[in-house]
Amino acid sequence: MADAKTKVTLVGTVLAKQGVEFIYEGEAAGCDTCKVKKACNNLQIGRRYRIISVRTTHHECPVHLNGTTAVEVMEAPITVLINADMAIINSKIKLELSCNKSDCRSYPLCHPDGVVEGEKYVVSDVLGNASDICEKGRALKLVDIRPS
């Protein structure tokens, strides 16, 4: 699989540390009058990102404590439980989050933050079998995925 592409964006200076992961949730209300709002809001809503490097560029910001800092990010892998028959490295899958058993112990792994339902992903690693039995009787595998 090809290396993931990186992108430069702005994040709150307090959060600007290599290795920090976050889910981009969109433009904040205080961004309306900011001169650099396009640089902060250049990611895809709902996707998980990891900070790869921190740059020296700093901007004042009405939203973030201590302003913003430029960082280089890439889309981070997401660990998720999927049907075992779909758990093939480098295969493209489309996640359907149809299970609504929110009291199940595996629910957070079946519905991880950063997954956009209906989008296509590539299985980047197969981590193993699910530790719990699915209440729906499905055989599940734990995998890392990335957007395709």
Image (cartoon, rainbow, N blue to C red):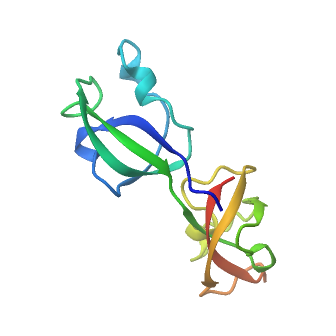
Residue depicted at 27% across the width and 51% down the height: 17
- Residue 93 lies, with reference to residue 28, above or below; the image says below
- Residue 47 lies, with reference to residue 99, above or below; the image says above
Residue 36 lies, in percent from the top left, at 37, 19
Residue 133 lies, in percent from the top left, at 68, 87
Quarter-of-image position of residue 104: bottom right
Quick check: 57 left or right of 117?
left
Residue depicted at 77% across the width and 61% down the height: 93
Residue depicted at 63% across the width and 57% down the height: 2
Residue 97 lies, in percent from the top left, at 72, 59
Total labels drawn: 0
Quick check: 140 left or right of 6?
right
- Residue 50 lies, with reference to residue 107, above or below; the image says above
Residue 22 lies, in percent from the top left, at 42, 50
- Residue 85 lies, with reference to residue 73, above or below; the image says below
Residue sitting farthest toward the left = 66
Residue sitting farthest toward the right = 85
Q: Quadrant of the N terminus?
A: bottom right
Q: Nearer the viewer, residue 141 or 1?
A: 1
Quick check: 8 left or right of 118?
left
Residue depicted at 62% across the width and 85% down the height: 128
Quick check: 16 left or right of 91?
left
Q: Nearer the viewer, residue 143 or 6?
A: 6
Quarter-of-image position of residue 16: top left
